[in-house]
Structure formats: C-alpha cells, structure tokens
Amino acid sequence: MEESKENRIGDMKVKLCIILIMVVILALIYFHITTPRELPARYTQAELDRIIAELDRRDADDCVLTRTDAGYQCKEIKTGRVFRIMEREALR
C-alpha cells in the first residue's frame, strides 16, 4: 500500500511538471503573437512618409516595399504592378 501512494505522488509530480511546461509554452506563444511589430530600422519615419505620399499620388494599392540601388521599389500585392521611386523623388 505504501508503494502505491509513492507511485501516485510521483505520477502527480510528473503531471504537474508537464502542465507547468505547457502553461509556459502557451504563455510564450501568446506574448510572441501579441507583441507589436516595429518598423524595420532601415527605414526612417520621414522616409516612409515621403514614400507613402508618392505612392498615394500614383494611386498604388497595398504593396511590398524594398530598397534598391536607385531608391525604392514597391510591388502591388494583388496585381503585381511595380512602382519605382527614385531617391530624389522620395526626398522632395
């Protein structure tokens, strides 16, 4: 009878450890998902404001922005149209 009590206590400890590990993993996932993402450090807010104004002027839809040697390139997600913004245009 004594052995079975020890086994039950050991089983409860194992189950408690498993539950604790699961809670920690779920908490990490929750905080990873809910943490706000910041803008990449390679674009300043002033650069983004100028680029967005230029894309609005050209009536561009949602697009993916990448830096190129000559300036910036923005490829529309839906249509695939590419808008190129030269460095001088972005700095106006």
Image: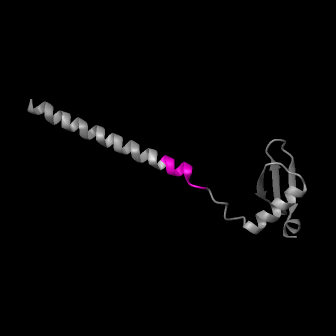
Q: On the picture, is 76 further left or further right than 39?
A: right
Instruction: Provide residue 79's location: percent of width, then percent of height.
Output: 84, 42
Predominant SS along the magenta part:
helix
Q: Which residues are magenta?
A: 29-36
Q: Residue at x 82, y 65 (%)?
A: 50
Answer whether residue 37 is magenta in the image: no
The quadrant in which residue 21 appears is top left
Does residue 51 sit above or below 13 in this rendering? below
Residue placed most toward the observer, 84 or 1: 1
Q: Residue furthest left?
A: 1
The quadrant in which residue 37 appears is bottom right
Does residue 34 sit above or below 54 in this rendering? above
Q: Residue at x 29, y 37 (%)?
A: 15
Q: Residue at x 82, y 56 (%)?
A: 73
Q: On the picture, is 65 further left or further right than 33?
A: right
Instruction: Provide residue 39's location: percent of width, then percent of height.
Output: 67, 60
